[in-house]
Image: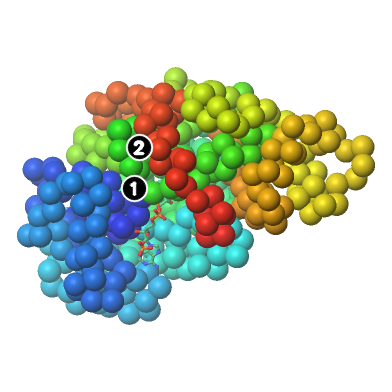
Amino acid sequence: MNIFLTGSTGFLGGELLVNLSKQKDVDKIYCLIRALSEADAIHRIEHIFDLHDDEYDRNKIIPIIGNLFDDKLTESLKTNKNLNDIDVIIHSAANTSFSRIYDDLVVRANIGGLQKILEWAKDLSHLSTFLYVGTATICGKDIKNRLIFEDESPNLQANHLVKYTYTKMQGEILLRQYLKEDQILIARPSIIMGDSRPWIPRSPVILWALATINLMRLVPIHPHYPLDIISVDYASNAIVQLLLAKRNYNVYHISSGKDSATTPFKVTKTIEAYFPERPPFHFVNKSMISQMKNWAKDRLQPGSELYNYQEYLDYWTNSFKDNGKLRILLYAIESYFEFIELGHVFDNTRLLQDVKIPASIPAETYIVNSLDFLEKIDVFEGAIDP
Ligand SMILES: NC(=O)c1ccc[n+]([C@@H]2O[C@H](COP(=O)([O-])OP(=O)(O)OC[C@H]3O[C@@H](n4cnc5c(N)ncnc54)[C@H](OP(=O)(O)O)[C@@H]3O)[C@@H](O)[C@H]2O)c1
């Protein structure tokens, strides 16, 4: 099997690359990498394998320098003879930002970039599978607090909280315009957070939100709404096994499903004991976020409900010193709160039936393995570059 993989320098893509490199059915993996030179690209690949001391086989893993924004990308892939024998494409590269200021880049990467890859892929004579890493959150914000099934998306009527999920939905529609139905495989992960193995996760993505909640302690979300979270090792293993499995569908949730879903209460209860110097977690209605923002601007009206939580306001004053920092955090975390409040759980029956893997470990169980890392996350840095 000769694979072309995009996004290998990312959180999930890095795990996919390492996992695929260990599969005996995989002969070569060509990785699309943003780099200034061949040496720079190889250096980036080395870094992926060095993180957890995995073996890097230079004969098996070959960098292809390229950028999804480059107008000449399709042409350069078409003229690269080494890529003629590709039979599997795994497209994991994306701009995953929730921030409005990146909307333009999100569209250019997730729709424009995908289109460039598809323009090349459609003419590959040996292409058996185009595995698109989508997201289960393309179901949109109108569905709330229930189990969601693969067939409900893509739905053009769905309203989206952020441009990112809209572009990922459009991506699925694009695939069908370029490829034959039997070439398409869509893996839709839910929320990927941390690593269930006792080592440093590849990225602080999503863990940043937990680190921020862990710092705030007074949290404007519902504590008991279900949260569909999986670890990055579970996600990558499920996707690789899915690629190798005999499949009955071409769209799969890669998710915790209802049996392994967690809640904000369960995750925070687990981590609370490890940070005894902070006040206990307390959950308040989501409408309190506007009062929190006003407090951070020194504009909270006298008599406002937030003053009932003086212990937390004193704690914020001590921890943040400068309220501007709290404001930055609140603006960056708000869309994460909105996602949490949706209470989405993604059915994983297809995955568990067709791929012989166990269900995921609930996040409140494995999260203890990421506590050292959680403590080191610079939440302000993450808030500025979400
Ligand atoms: N993380 C989650 O919770 C989650 C959940 C559901 C689905 N997903 C999906 O999983 C996939 C991987 O997500 P992730 O969390 O691993 O994201 P990530 O850590 O942000 O990685 C993104 C990858 O895409 C590459 N990329 C971005 N823009 C590019 C461009 N213009 N040209 C070439 N490469 C570009 C990045 O390369 P550089 O290193 O050069 O920037 C990086 O390798 C995405 O498709 C995402 O939609 C993620």
Q: Residues within 10 Å of mark 1 (few under 14, many from 20)?
A: some
| Scheme of colours in the image | rainbow
Q: Is residue 268 left or right of residue 281?
A: left
* Residue 209 on image: x %, y %: 54, 43
Q: Residue beneath label 2, please?
A: 195
* Residue at image location 34% in from the left, 47% down from the top: 202
Between 166 and 317, the residue placed more toward the observer is: 317
Q: Name the outermost residue toward the top.
A: 259
Q: Is mark 1 within 8 Å of ligand 1?
A: yes
Please indicate, yes or no, whether residue 163 appears anywhere in the rendered image. Answer: no
Please indicate, yes or no, whether residue 364 appears anywhere in the rendered image. Answer: yes
User: How far, Cα to Cα, is label 2 from label 1?
Assistant: 8 Å
* Residue 344 on image: x %, y %: 55, 33
Q: Residue beneath label 1, please?
A: 202
| Residue 291 figure quarter | top right
* Residue 310 on image: x %, y %: 79, 34
* Residue at image location 10% in from the left, 60% down from the top: 58
Q: Amino acid at mark 2?
A: Asp
Q: Earlier in the sequence, mark 2 or mark 1?
A: 2
Q: Is residue 312 above or below residue 300?
A: above
Q: Amino acid at mark 1?
A: Arg
Q: Is residue 15 above or below residue 101?
A: above
SS label for mark 2: loop
Q: How many tags in the picture?
A: 2
Q: Is residue 35 left or right of residue 262?
A: left
Q: Is residue 228 above or below residue 46?
A: above
Are discs 2 and 1 less than 8 Å apart at CB?
yes
Q: Is residue 143 above or below residue 100?
A: above
Q: In what quadrant does ligand 1 lie?
A: bottom left
